[in-house]
């Protein structure tokens, strides 16, 4: 990877099982490690991570993590001036129950805290955030993404599968036919 990306000299990585004080969970037997990374040619600071262990109702036993870093990008034409951008890398499960549980119970509250902390330090930089990664969102199941992008009042009114702890199969069986 270093040969392919020679200018990318700043790297942060955290495995799904966690590290640096983050508890991700234990990888299933026979599974290799997976995780998330942020690779940049510009300096990184304020590195943070959150673990998203598998929920009891998930078929996916792989632990997941999300990593955040502030990237300091030089401002063209201004000496020693940079723009700070918060970059967040995540890998959500393929299992829909796990997606809902991880985003609702771990990722969204953690991102809200991160945004509030960033805003206290630098209100302008807090407006520059980028979430990326393997979010495993599909067109017929966008509710985990909705949690991250829609206002709370709208989410409460929508009553999506992600706002309950009932398994999705049970909710589908109970859904009225139209």
Image (spheres, rainbow, N blue to C red):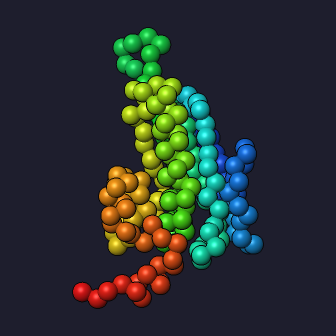
Residue 100 placed where, x, y %? 49, 66
**Please, is residue 6 above or below residue 24 in the view?**
above
Residue visible at 37% across and 19% down in the picture: 76
Left/right placement of residue 12 relative to residue 135 reads right
At horizontal 45% and vertical 21% (from top left) the residue drawn is 82
Q: Residue furthest left?
A: 178
Q: Percent from the top left, x then y, of residue 164?
A: 48, 70
Task: Answer yes or no: is residue 170 visible.
Answer: yes
Q: Residue at x 43, y 81 (%)?
A: 171
Which residue is at a point 42% across and 39% down the rendered structure image? 129
Q: Is residue 25 left or right of residue 73?
A: right
Would residue 41 be seen by someone viewing this image from the given angle?
A: no
User: In this rendering, is residue 82 above or below 78?
Assistant: below
Would residue 71 appear left or right of 62 to someone viewing this image? left
Q: Is residue 45 above or below residue 78?
A: below
Q: How many marks on residues?
A: 0
- Residue 92: % across, % down: 52, 61
Q: Quadrant of the C terminus?
A: bottom left
Q: Position of residue 166 (x, y in %)?
A: 51, 77
């Amino acid at each position: 990877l270093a040969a392919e990306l020679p200018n990318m000299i700043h790297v942060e990585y955290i495995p799904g099982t966690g590290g640096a004080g983050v508890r991700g969970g234990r990888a299933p037997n026979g599974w290799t490690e997976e995780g998330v990374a942020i690779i940049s040619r510009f300096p990184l600071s304020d590195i943070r991570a959150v673990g998203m262990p598998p929920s009891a109702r998930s078929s996916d036993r792989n632990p997941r993590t999300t990593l955040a870093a502030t990237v300091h990008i030089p401002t063209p034409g201004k000496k020693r001036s940079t723009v700070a951008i918060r970059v967040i890398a995540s890998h959500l499960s393929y299992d829909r129950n796990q997606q809902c549980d991880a985003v609702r119970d771990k990722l969204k509250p953690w991102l809200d805290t991160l945004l509030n902390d960033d805003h206290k330090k630098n209100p302008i930089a807090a407006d520059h955030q980028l979430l990326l990664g393997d979010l495993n969102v599909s067109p017929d199941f966008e509710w985990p993404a909705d949690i991250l992008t829609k206002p709370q009042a709208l989410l409460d009114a929508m009553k999506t599968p992600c706002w309950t702890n009932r398994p999705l199969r049970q909710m589908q069986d109970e859904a009225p036919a139209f």
